[in-house]
Amino acid sequence: MKEQLESIRVKAMEALEDASTPAALEELRVKLLGKKGELTAVLKQMGKLSAEERPIMGQMANSVRAAIEEKLEERKETIHAAAMEARLAAETIDVTIPGESYCIGHQHPMNQVLQQIKDTFVGMGYEVYEAPEVELADYNFTRLNIEEGHPSRDRSDTFYFTDDDSVLLRTQTSPMQIRYMETHKPPICMLAPGRVFRKDEADATHSPMFHQIEGLVVAEDITMGDLKGALISILRKVYGESAATRFRPHHFPFTEPSCEMDMACHKCHGTGELDGQVCSTCHGEGWIEVLGAGMVHPKVLENCGIDPEKYSGFAFGMGLERMAMGQLKINDLRLIFDNDVRFLNQF
Ligand code: PHE
């Protein structure tokens, strides 16, 4: 029995020394000291010993147990310390590595101009209105007095969704005039910005998607003078008090009379020439068209259930990109949509 105890002690010391994880240690503890462990098995045989031998063996068994417990504790601490050491080494932070920097974005330059235009109109009492980009041909054309067969309804100009040409991507923001008049009674003072779509190849001044800002004012005794006053004041607000503008007669099926408004070219300052060459921004015109406008056609008022004998109104549709290009002195429309941060960061 003495040899048995001695052998348990020696083997236990070796096994504990070899154990390198907390799990291995726990397994050994159960194996050596547990109820079904080796030491317990030896102690169970104590009854067979003589009365003199029993206390001696008892003492010896206790000292083996104590030695094992002590060794267990010591190994536990060593293994824990080693694990900690490894973790510290693995998680070292190199404080000399440059940190990650985050760029904070800002509003797109075109939206900055849109915001300014909206603010100005809201200040004049306009209500901002929105409507779907997918539109009925009825609203986009028919009720705006644009009859069947009109060139703007052509499949080569308009994105249609249906074979019968009844659903399309709106080609202008003017259908919002109809939608608004259907649901609101005069006096009306509305501003409706939005995306519009036309089958245009992208170049310096064209894009298949661009933005317009529609305006509509309907009340008693509205005149062309009101139209001019509102539009001149908005252009001055955006381009400065000295901004030169002009109105030209034009034709739109939904306004009568109709006009277009130009502003002096921001590149050549209205001269049409730049360094002895024809100005490429205005093609030598000296003027850039920024919007179409006119007095709301009586038929359009009637189409929306408004009495043209009692009410009159004006409407306009301005090109937001044109306005932004003029204000920010950008000479290629594509820059607005490319979203190159080297460009955007300049504003
Ligand atoms: N919708 C017209 C266009 O896209 C502009 C316009 C709007 C003209 C309102 C008159 C009145 O060209």
Image: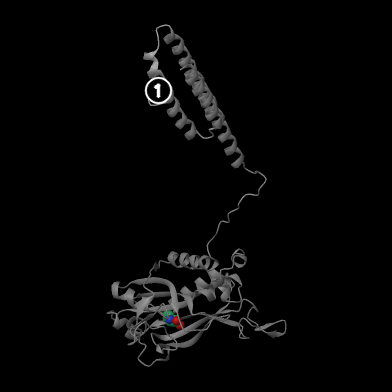
- Image height check: is 4 above or below 22? above
Colour style of the rendered protein structure = one colour
Element type at mark 1: helix
Residue at image position (51%, 25%) is 72
Quadrant of the rendering where the N terminus is positioned: top left
Could you tell me residue 173's position as x and y percent?
41, 77
Q: Is residue 308 visible to the viewer in this orientation of the structure?
A: no
The residue that mark 1 highlights is 41
Q: Residue furthest right?
A: 276
Could you tell me residue 71's position as x and y percent?
53, 23
Going by the numbered disc 1, the residue's amino acid type is Ala
Along the viewing direction, whichever of 29 and 86 lies nearer the viewer: 29
Residue at image position (43%, 22%) is 39
Q: Residue furthest bottom?
A: 149
Could you tell me residue 12's position as x and y percent?
51, 26
Q: Is residue 338 visible to the viewer in this orientation of the structure?
A: yes
Q: Residue furthest top?
A: 52
- Image height check: is 56 above or below 191? above
Q: In the rendered image, which quarter is residue 302 located in?
A: bottom left
Quadrant of the rendering where the C terminus is positioned: bottom right
Could you tell me residue 331's position as x and y percent?
61, 76
Ligand 1 located in image quadrant: bottom left
Along the viewing direction, whichever of 88 and 195 lies nearer the viewer: 88
Q: In the rendered image, which quarter is residue 52 located in?
A: top left
